[in-house]
Amino acid sequence: MTVKKLSKNDFDGFVDAIIQSKKVYGPQVKGEKYDFGTLSTSQDLCLDYDVSLLPPTKYFLPVRETLMTYEVGGAYKSEYDEESFVLLGVHPYDLVAINQMDILFSQDNYDSHYMTRRKNGTIVACDVVTPSANVFASSMGTAVGKDGCDLLVTDIGDGYVLEAVTDKGAILLAKANQTTEANDSDIQKRQAVWGANEKGLNKHELKCDPHYLPKLLDKAYDHPVWDEMAETCFACGSCNLVCPTCYCFDVKDDVNWDMVTGKRERCLDGCLLDGFSKVAGNHEFRNVQAHRFRHRLFRKAKYVPAKIGGQIACVGCGRCVDACLPNIANPVTIYNKLLDDIGIS
Amino acid sequence: MCECCTESKKDIYLPQMATVTETRLMNETEMYLRLTMDDGEFVYKPGHFVEISIAGIGEAPFTIASSPTMTNGFEIVVRRIGNVSNAIHNLKVGGKVGVRGPLGEGIYPAEEAKGKNVVFVCGGIGLVPQRSFINYVLDNRSDYGDVAILMGIKNYDQRFFQEELEGWVKRDDVTFLETLDEGDGRWDGSVGVVTTLVENVKGLLNNAVVPVCGPPIMYKFVLMALAEYDVPHDRIYLNLERKMKCGVGKCGHCQINDLYCCMDGPVFKYSDLAKVPEAI
């Protein structure tokens, strides 16, 4: 596909041209951190952000969304968000997470709500410029990559290299007026960025190939690490909320003020939360905090991988490490401890 | 994007409307309902479950209580215990509910059990999911070997489907044994937990399929009792309860280690649960 170069000044014009034509979400400053939000001008875009507070997967699986509407006591009508949009500035590790969600929501039972949003979205990925404090994407093999995005943007210092990965991306790239063909030097510079990120996004180093993790966990179910780590767990669910591969949800009915109409909403839920597995009659099947803690790590590196062709459902974004108050959520700490105790065999 | 994006907008979460054609309060907490789909056909097998919706209140899973041999709709039994079940208890004949289903890929071995004995072990409201398979077996009686139904229930007042149970007592091609955890003056039958009944049907067990359903506490004791008679694990079927919120393998609530109760179950072979410590 087409690879172009655009100067940094002209890039702003390109972003503004996209904003003129479509709804655009991108990373922006939020207090001392960054988060994705609606972009009204290119000036608000922070493409050199380190990591967003919430993962961009929320634009496909929102924290809260309406699945259907109804009249109380009557029939249901499916509701879909049909607005097309551009998701600008997705880091490669988050792109991997989106690709995994695509498989999970389309396989077996096709989730038309997720997939409608996904179909309406154009993803512009960008290579990481500023590694975040807890990123370990290099360890997970997710630091670099363009599969699943429509357009890839790489900051090479004196400008951006833009590669249209899909037709959708090519259409978007056509909005950039001042592009030149990327020359060999530009491509080499991009390769250097990739080379640096493949090794450099690694504040926590996993001591094994991530694909070994399911085997490791096979031998770790009764290991004391779960009790030890979960001892200080608040069961707050922050690790679930910020994780780009956590997709468990709850569904609730909400009646409008007119007491006649209402909506059925889906909202994110978390397996760390008390009551997540509680059934009618108050029987809680996973009622020990350490078991819920273990369940999250087993989902990431054993249960979900079995559903998505062996891919590890932890992309190394480090958000859970940032979000966890008692500092027990770091998957690398846990997996490395298990590797030390159990070893690779 | 992949070819799946071309799929139509079939909404896996959208309930279809059904009409309540019969209701009966069976004891203080259990209500029987017969439902008929408004758009006609509803094909299911013993062990399937449905998600029932009351618009404005919510949705909850219920195992189908009737056998597919019954025509004219299907039956559920609902214990009054939460928001949705309370709302269902308030329904009258002619009332509307939303239905998604039938759901579940792990169902009762209606075909595999043919030619074998079938020994049902039911605890309390666990009779309800079992009833679908029980009535299926009784309606196709000549296809199966000896049939026994072991029923344990807490006390006399919680008994339900009593007419039907009395019918099973009278049949000479079924062994029906019932015990109460707490006996009282109105009851002259067995007193004790359901596992005390297993010995009475030990002669049937060496060639039996054994479907089990009851409260969580019951399973281990039943499995221990069956182990005494060396019932192979691949002939014990456990109908498990979990919070099957979405019913289609997405929401994560019903996960039992790597299994989804809604997709892999709700009926599991005990032998398939050997490496699933969260199952019981």
Image: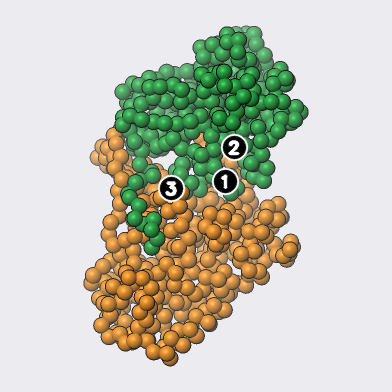
Q: Are marks 1 and 3 in contact (CB under 8 Å)?
A: no
**Labels 1 and 2 positioned on one and the same chain:** yes
Q: Secondary structure at mark 3?
A: loop
Q: Chain of mark 2?
A: B
Does dot 1 land on a helix, a strand or a loop? strand
Question: From what the image shows, is residue B78 above or below residue A167?
Answer: above
- CA neighbours of label 3 inside 10 A, class few (<14), some (14 to 19), many (20+): some
Query: Does B186 sit above or below residue A60?
Result: above
Q: Chain of mark 1?
A: B
Q: Which residue is at a point 67% across and 55% down the rendered structure image? A: A218
Residue position for label 2: B268
Quadrant (top left, top right, bottom left, bottom right) of the N terminus of chain A = bottom left
Type of the residue with mark 3: Asn
Residues tagged 1 and 2 counted as in contact (Cβ below 8 A): yes
- Left/right placement of residue B93 relative to residue B167 reads left
Q: Which mark lies nearer to you, 1 or 3?
A: 3
Q: Sort mark 1 into few (<14), some (14-19) or many (20+) by Cα contacts within 10 Å.
A: some
Residue B126, position in %: x, y? 56, 27
Residue B163, x across and y down, in percent: 51, 12
* Left or right: where A126 falls relative to B107: left
Residue B115 location in percent, x, y? 62, 24
Give the chain ID for the orange colour. Answer: A
Marking on residue A334: none
Discs 3, 2: same chain = no
Residue position for label 3: A109
In the picture, which chain is green?
B
Figure quadrant of residue A40: bottom left
- Residue B22 seen in the current view: yes
Chain letter, disc 3 residue: A
